[in-house]
Amino acid sequence: MNYKTLKTYIFLITFFSTMMLTAQSNLIDLVNSYSADKRALNKFYTNNESQEYYQRFTTLYTNWEKKVTAIDFDDLNQQEKVDYLLLKNLIEKETYFFNLDYKAFKEVVNISDFAKDIFPFIQERRRGKKPDAQTLAKILHNATAQIDTEIKTLNEKPFKDWLMAEKASKVISSFQKSLKEAYSFYYSYDPEFTWWVQKPFEELSTKLLDYANLLNSNYSKTSIKDDGSGIIGKPIGKDALIESLNFEFIPYTPEQLIKTAESQFNWCKEEMIKASKELGYGTNWKAALEHVKNTYVAAGEQPQAITDLYNQSVEFIEERDLITFPEMAKETWGMIMMTPERQKVNPFFTGGWEISISYPTQDMSEDDKLMSMRGNNPNFSRATVQHELLPGHNLQFFMNARNKSYRRAFDTPFWMEGWALYWEINLWNKEFPQTPEQKLGMLFWRIHRCARIIFSLKYHLGDMTPQQCIDMLVNEVGHEYANAEAEVRRSFATSYTPPLYQMAYMTGGLQFYALRNEMLKKGWTEKQFHDRVLQENMMPVELLRSLIQELPLKENFKTNWKFSTEFK
């Protein structure tokens, strides 16, 4: 065999081997259809706190469950089996939490009895049916009077807790928005409608706003809503936590995860003490951390500091040939400054398609300016710039848009945040931090991720309050108080973070680290592993493991991978 023939032969083997590993799934259209159906219904049934909405989505989930289970699982290839399990799991997860919402709705729906005769008007508006304006005006007027009667008796029948009160308030607010939309469709375009309905609608709309506000505060005073921190969250309880972990293919109880996090927390503390001794502070790691916080750059110099850190990490990774960085990914990442409003819940910079820099603005108080600068010093940021850019979130977004993009429907923080956190572990092991200041900076974030598992799970189990979480971050991790408060607010009082989000960083990182070690033992290089992960797009890490290792899969697959809990 001559050289040219041999070269062609090797190319064909490599080509077809790659094709077999990344065989396409014939379930792509099915996954896309499920996502499209949800978007269509959410756009059409805009009142998401109504009997109509809940009944329609109950039908959606039931029909899709039947559609998926009708597929012959044994006839699927490995990619398709994984997509089948991902879609089946997604439907089950969304159905579970949907049913919890539906149950909560049923407990308070009677507070909207006054609206029963108004719903037909909202429904018929979707097809532009001309309403009987005089009759509708009377219905709206009567509804206002009925609400007045209900308001007078509110104090006599408080809800058992603030969660029920909040749900009731949302039911009214959602109805008010739907009514306003329907009214706006006809107002001014239909003279008769405008003449009859304008005043009754305005009176009812005002009354609905008052009613929603009153309902929100109408709960038993034995129900504690605020522990003094001003942070209002919704602990989901142990049962929902366990179900959530199962849906994410995490085969551990909350208590086991807390124990693991505490073990990793203690390891981080030991390493911080080592770095503290290198700096001359002995075992006083807090004093050493104060020293590091004061390495912040002057106002106006943070963007350049971020760029420098980015260049250092990319150069470090490329020198070791750890992953493929597409040239366009390196070319097109962006940078913006975070608004003061966002910094209240995001005290540190975030990233994705662009890196959003959290740093003081002129209008902040002097104390807040200093806390922001200290909390975003370059040594702290050493662990997080690559987390947000390359090879972290920016590279994930770049590759997700170009590889099996339909799998973005299976978004999970254990993949998204776990991957970025895994690189913090990997770079630490490769001695990316050289000075004790750099080590303390990276360890600060690592111990913070451990603390996130502990305080978020304990909060949802009912064992910690938001204020106790803040105190833990200040006293045990070393956060500035304002930054700790913002972190806890972000964890529990915004829609940004679902219940398992904060614990997903370190847990997902441990999963990726364990999977990496398994693949290296099978003869893969780190670069092969890293590139393959990003070629498969988002999914729970256990299913990614089954996919790339060609493990046998069953239709009733349940989580069973006891991934390593040690990464030292």
Image: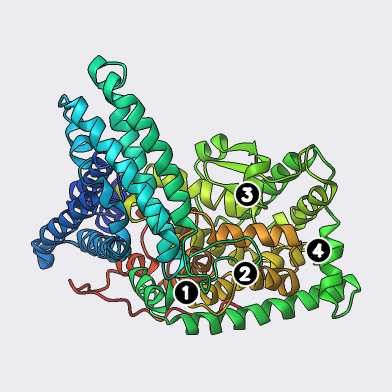
What secondary structure is found at the residue carrying circle 3? helix
Q: Where is residue 125 in the image (x, y as percent from the top left)?
A: 20, 31
Identify the amino acid type marked 4: Glu
Q: How far apart are marks 4 and 3 (CA)?
A: 20 Å
Residue 227 numbered mark, or none:
2
Which sits in the foreground, 40 or 148? 148
Residue 247 numbered mark, or none:
none
Identify the amino acid type marked 3: Val
Could you tell which of marks 4 and 2 lies nearer the N-terminus? 2
Q: Position of residue 191 (x, y in %)?
A: 26, 15
Which residue is under mark 3? Answer: 314
Q: Which of marks 1 and 4 is in front?
A: 4
In the image, is residue 144 above or below residue 519? above
Residue 437 numbered mark, or none:
4
Which sits in the foreground, 368 or 434? 368
Q: Is residue 532 visible?
A: no
